[in-house]
Image (cartoon, helix red, strand yellow):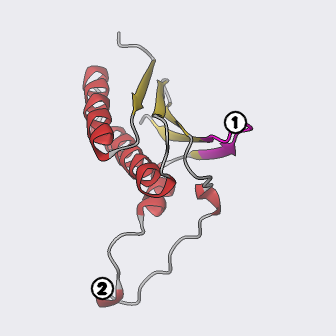
Amino acid sequence: MPSDQHVLRFPGTRAGFENAAAALRGVLDARGLSDGPRYNVELAFEEVATNIIRHGSPHGDVEVVIAFSEHEIVLTFDDDGAAFDPREHPAPAVPASIDEAAPGGLGLVLVRKVTSRMTYERTSQHRNHLTLAISAR
């Protein structure tokens, strides 16, 4: 039986993200996670990790702990980038037509949609600590 918890630690760079995403896929392969939850975990990981790298500009490594239980998969992101509480970020306005739609900007909307719980803390050590829970079913 695969471990119930995995830690991915990677530099806050595009190459670091690519390596971590490949490692995550390996963890998910080993667990045999069904398609729906797997898609949601990969989506949340990609959106949050790329936002940390693009907008948070971390100086040190980004750490992501993935914990599996019977009912949920919990992703906990920890980084030293700029403070950002995604729960306080307003959802973008819905465009009136496809012609008015701008590319991008919907990542957090998607993350909110696939998570059952989201918590955020800016620690006394000036670190972001974001936890996302995703249904395992």
Seen in the picture, residue 5 relative to 56 is either above or below; the reply is: above
Foreground mark, 1 or 2?
A: 1
- Distance from disc 1 to disc 2, alpha carbons, whole Å, reads 43 Å
* Secondary structure category for the residue under label 1: loop
> Residue 33, position in %: x, y?
31, 30
Residue appearing at x 60%, y 47% in the figure: 118
Q: Along the line of sight, which residue is nearer the eye, 45 or 79?
A: 79
Query: Looking at the figure, which quarter contains the C terminus?
Result: top left
Q: Which residues are magenta?
A: 118-128
The numbered disc on residue 98 is 2
Check the image and name the residue furthest to the front: 59
> Residue 69, position in %: x, y?
49, 23
Residue appearing at x 37%, y 39% in the figure: 37
* Secondary structure category for the residue under label 2: helix
In the rendered structure, which amino acid carries the disc numbered 2?
Ile
In the rendered structure, which amino acid carries the disc numbered 1?
Gln
In the rendered image, which quarter is residue 8 located in?
top left
The numbered disc on residue 62 is none
12 sits to left or right of 23: right
Task: Tell which circle, 1 or 2, labels the residue nearer the N-terminal end.
Answer: 2
> Residue 87, position in %: x, y?
62, 57
Residue appearing at x 49%, y 45% in the figure: 58
Q: Along the line of sight, which residue is nearer the eye, 49 or 5?
A: 49
> Residue 78, position in %: x, y?
55, 36
Label 2 Cα crowd, 10 Å radius (few <14 / some 14-19 / many 20+): few
Query: Looking at the figure, which quarter contains the N terminus?
Result: top left
Residue named by callout 1:
125
